[in-house]
Image: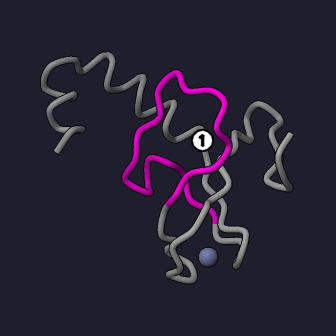
């Protein structure tokens, strides 16, 4: 898996990526389920722009666009900025 490769090659960078990925949250617009990008199995690193990501919600099990936002920067899951 990609994460494992990263943690072996660059543990410092990996810790940074993990912190970033945990700061980003995904929210399902259908059921309101929220999970961090990291816990969802993804990584996010120095990313900007796109506020949505395709994925399967673990709350309702549906595949669709999940809202991507960052609460520690005052971002709200209510909608696009
Ligand atoms: Zn859902």
Closest to the observer, 60 or 22: 60
Q: Quadrant of residue 2?
A: top left
**Given the current orientation, which residue lies at the most extreme bottom position?**
60
Question: On the rendered image, what quadrant is the C terminus found in?
Answer: top right
Image check: 20 left or right of 32? left
Q: Where is residue 70 in the image (x, y as percent from the top left)?
A: 69, 39
Q: Does the magenta stretch include residue 46?
A: yes
Position of 2 relative to 8 (above/below): below
Q: Does the magenta stretch include residue 73?
A: no
Quadrant containing ligand 1: bottom right
Colour scheme shown: one colour
Taking the spot 52% from the left edge, 41% from the top edge, the residue there is 22
Q: Position of residue 68 (x, y in %)?
A: 65, 48
Numbered disc 1: secondary structure? loop
- CB of mark 1 near ligand 1 (< 8 Å): no
Number of numbered discs overlaid on the protein picture: 1
Type of secondary structure dominating the magenta stretch: loop
Taking the spot 56% from the left edge, 59% from the top edge, the residue there is 35
Image check: 71 left or right of 8? right
Question: On the rendered image, what quadrant is the N terminus found in?
Answer: top left
Residue denoted by label 1? 24
Provide the residue span drawn in magenta.
Answer: 34-54
Q: Position of residue 75 (x, y in %)?
A: 80, 39
Taking the spot 73% from the left edge, 69% from the top edge, the residue there is 29
Closest to the observer, 66 or 19: 66
Q: Where is residue 64 in the image (x, y as percent from the top left)?
A: 57, 68
Taking the spot 73% from the left edge, 35% from the top edge, the residue there is 72
Q: Badge 1: few (under 14), some or many (20 or more) residues near its Cα, within 10 Å? A: many
């Amino acid at each position: 898996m990609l994460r494992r490769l990263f943690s072996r090659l660059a543990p410092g960078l990996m810790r940074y990526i993990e912190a970033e990925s945990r700061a980003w949250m995904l929210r399902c617009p259908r059921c309101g389920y929220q999970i961090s990008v990291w816990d969802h199995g993804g990584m996010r690193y120095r990313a900007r722009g796109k506020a949505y990501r395709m994925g399967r919600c673990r709350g309702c099990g549906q595949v669709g666009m999940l809202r991507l936002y960052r609460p520690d920067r005052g971002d709200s899951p209510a909608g696009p900025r």
